[in-house]
Image: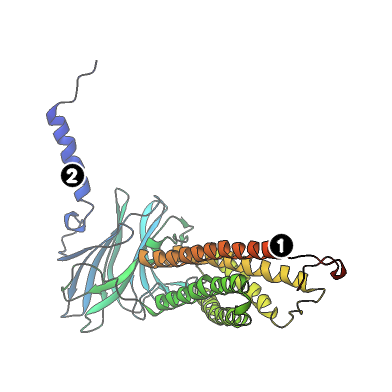
Amino acid sequence: MASPPSIPLLFLLLTLFIATCSSLTCTTQKLTTNKVYPNCLDLPFLNSFLHWTHDPSNSSLSVVFVATPPNPGGWVSWGLNPTGTGMVGTQALVAFKNNGVMAVKMLDIKSYSDFVPGKLSFDVWDLKAEDVGGVMRIFASMKVPDKAVTLNHVWQVGPSTTAGRLDKHGFAPANLNAKGKLSLNGEQSSTDTGAVDSRTKRKNFHGVLNAVSWGVLFPLGVIIARYMRTFPSADPAWFYLHITCQLSAYVIGVAGWGTGMKLGSESEGIQYSVHRNIGIALFSLCTLQLSALFIRPKKDHKYRYFWNIYHHSFGYTIIILGIINIYRGFDILNPEKKWKSTYSSVIIALGVIAFLLEVITWIVVFKRKSRNSTKPYDAYNNGQPLGI
């Protein structure tokens, strides 16, 4: 039987483990340079770090960006965005291995599919990159605006390169949220990710509009039509309530759909095909459903039966697709958990209400049938219950 490891060996292994874990913070990382960087940030996404120093006397910023690419042949990037808070407009520095040798290039990101290599909108010097045990580092100094207090910075990692060109990075929430504000006055020790840029506001606006229209108003309108018309006293009030809900849902939904199409056209490099296709299908089905109001036959018309099949099947399909697409939208936006929980609570509440009304409706129908079946029959009335 093998002897158990000695206590000194276990202590050594434990010490090495603690040292490895502690190296995952920027304050314990040792850089291969004599330059001093008094500030460092453990960036909140993509297991990345930033060491930096700001010299207000000459408006310069010196940085060391540290990150690990998803794969050994991947790339890492950090940059400043002088015009916005997202990826578009970022003046980026990218490090990767070119034929086994570390290389660094500058990219002007004009759109999600238009990366212009070459000189950036500000001066950059002392630019280099290195790979230490699979961890890549970008060293650079750059000119920043005079009297700048904060800068918008963006960082990213990618899985691979092809012939010196960067392959697309992932679109997980961590990738999409890798941005923030870098304070130059030393008042904060972490990036400020609380600010919401205009594009994110439009995404949130798109999500709210669609959740209210396809996810709440449309199912509510169906519930009104299905259950209120069971009661004769609710006629024709149920019809006008139903139409009001569906028209409101359509108008709000079209606004949300249009916002989504606009966001898609501005994001050529980002595709959420399933979410987009379901959105187009919803818009098309709901437009056809709206036309049912103008081609509705009278109750005794011979085509009313087929109209009912068309109208009901489209209505339930819209509800199902709408709810599915709203949850796909939650996965894309990745908002605070409370928003998804709130919508789930609303859907559950509507489901419970629909179930209770379904039970009440069937009870009413059975009672009516039972009451009608006890009425005396008259042979001269073709066997129909009296009073019908």
Q: Residue at x 33, y 58 (%)?
A: 46
Question: Foreground residue, 190 or 165?
Answer: 190
Q: State left or right for residue 315 relative to residue 120.
A: right
Q: Residue at x 51, y 63 (%)?
A: 351
Q: Amino acid at mark 2?
A: Ile
Q: Quadrant of residue 194?
A: bottom left
Q: Which residue is mark 2?
A: 18
In the rendered image, the quadrant that contains the N terminus is top left
Look at the image and name its color scheme.
rainbow
Closer to the chain start, of discs 1 and 2, is 2
Q: Which residue is mark 1?
A: 374
Q: Position of residue 288 (x, y in %)?
A: 68, 76
Q: Position of residue 250 (x, y in %)?
A: 58, 79
Q: Is residue 106 above or below residue 236?
A: above
Q: Quadrant of residue 254?
A: bottom right
User: Regarding mark 1 in the picture, which secondary structure is present there?
Assistant: loop
Q: Is residue 242 above or below residue 106?
A: below
Q: Amino acid at mark 1?
A: Thr
Q: Position of residue 354 (x, y in %)?
A: 54, 65
- CA distance for labels 1 and 2: 84 Å
* Disc 1 versus disc 2: nearer the observer: 1
